[in-house]
Amino acid sequence: MTTSAVPERTTAGERRPGAPGAAATGRGVPGRAGSARAVSGPVVAGYGAGALLSGTFTTLPGLLLLPYLTDTLGVGAALAGAAVLVPKLWAAVINPLVGGYARGARARRRLIRYGGAAMAVACALMFASVVPGTGGAYCAEAGFLLAATAFACFQVPYAALPADLATGPADRFRLAAGRVAGLGVAALAVGAAGPALVSSGGPSSGYRWAGCFGAAVIALGTLGVALAMRRTPAGRPVARARRAPSSAAVRMSLTAAPVRPTVKEILANRPFRALLGAAAAQSLATGVLLAGVPYATRQVLGDPALTSALVVVFVLPDLLAARLWARFGARVGTRRAYALAGALFAAGCLGFLAAPVVAPGFLLAAMLLAGAGHAGQLVFLYGLLPGCVAEEAAAGGDRGELLSGVFATGEAVGLALAPFGYGLVLAASGYVSAAGHTVHQSGTARFGILLGLALLPLLATVAGTLSLRGHRPAGVPARP
């Protein structure tokens, strides 16, 4: 039994930008809510540009930071995994706090603008170390901590934007498809250019150039989403849609209603809790895959240049298949389509177990298969979240931004646990770290590289699929 990716009925009470208190029912008509017209193409493109930040934050540290710590700075695998874990857990802690503050269009625009700018600076700082060992690790850790903080300030209001920009469920899935395409562009650019810059520039300067390139992509994405926020689908400034509370009002609301009880109430919402579990598991699976690919290409395949090609074929479906997944989910139901997407992703990851005995073309096909599944997972997760926010608003609640913050927390926890768990697998298999040069690893260590790359994403994908089975929004009947 599954729910539809684009629900046949929406809950009354979705706020129309520019008309506080007005309700837009949607009534199942794609791209229509009351008299408001569908969200425009430039708004979809601008909103999708904001995903350049999400894609860069996921891809660049996920792909390069763990190898940078172990193979350039000489940090042990387990300690390097813990170093990547701490800043992301910190982001998970502050996400709900940011959600409590990001109430109103003005507050969201301010957070997006300043958070994006700070994130660009932090991205360059993350790989700017000029000394190996402990000193370089501290510099990378400080940069990553700043990047995680800035990313939380950006991501929470960004995730809540579709509730303001969209006029109905079909528009929300259009925005979700644009967001997935933006993620694909970022992962394609950063995933291809980052390893290439590292290979051409050497173990130190190459990483610095990769960090600067990521900073430029982040700055571009910040500009795009800031421009999109200036206009609603009907062409009116978003700032008029809902007046932002004053700083004093925010402080009073946070004092009168602490975040912890509110988060507890949100987690009591079964559909949202199911969506949150699926998002955390999917982020964990993707994070492990990105963390493990550089180790597999360098230590098992003996061709570090293959990293860029594997990342490119992994993210291509984000650009090509997102809208197809949305249509497929509308026909068969979200949960059934998500299960198929997860099966494709897991099958592609399992293909790495055959890496020592197959040609590189087989691994490219496996990554393409995993990427096709990954695109579908993202479309359904990001398409369902605005619906939860709209239902919260329709029920008379004012916790939409906080709900988005909790969702971002789940993603952050998954991304945090991914390199940490993979680092533990490397340490358990006997992986040897070195500063500035490649060490010939034992057969057990090479097997551990592939086992972690295949098994951890499989387990996380199964967990996420089972979690999403509990997502059934109120008012939407189940399908047989």
Image: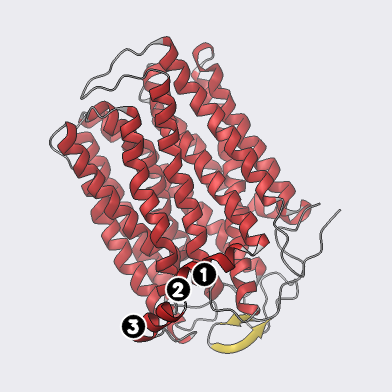
Instruction: Give me the residue at 40% from left, 74% from top.
Output: 101
Q: Are marks 2 and 1 in contact (CB under 8 Å)?
A: yes
Residue 187 in the image, given as x and y percentages of width and height: 43, 44
As measured in the structure, the alpha-carbon distance from the residue carrying label 2 to the one carrying label 1 is: 6 Å
Which of 85 and 150 lies nearest the eye of the viewer? 85
Say which element carries label 3.
helix
Q: Earlier in the sequence, mark 3 or mark 1?
A: 3
Q: Is residue 448 left or right of residue 12?
A: left
Q: Is residue 241 left or right of residue 186?
A: right
Classify 293 as above or below 124.
above
Callout 1: 10 Å neighbours few (<14), some, many (20+)?
A: few
As measured in the structure, the alpha-carbon distance from the residue carrying label 2 to the one carrying label 3 is: 16 Å
Where is mark 2, residue-wise? Answer: 258
Q: Earlier in the sequence, mark 2 or mark 3?
A: 3
Where is mark 1, residue-wise? Answer: 261
The quarter of the displayed image where residue 31 is located:
bottom right
Is residue 47 in view from this perspective?
yes
Residue 341 in the image, given as x and y percentages of width and height: 65, 42
As measured in the structure, the alpha-carbon distance from the residue carrying label 3 to the one carrying label 1 is: 21 Å
Residue 33 in the image, given as x and y percentages of width and height: 67, 78
Classify 127 as above or below 402.
above
The residue type indicated by label 1 comes to Pro
Say which element carries label 1.
helix
The residue type indicated by label 2 comes to Pro
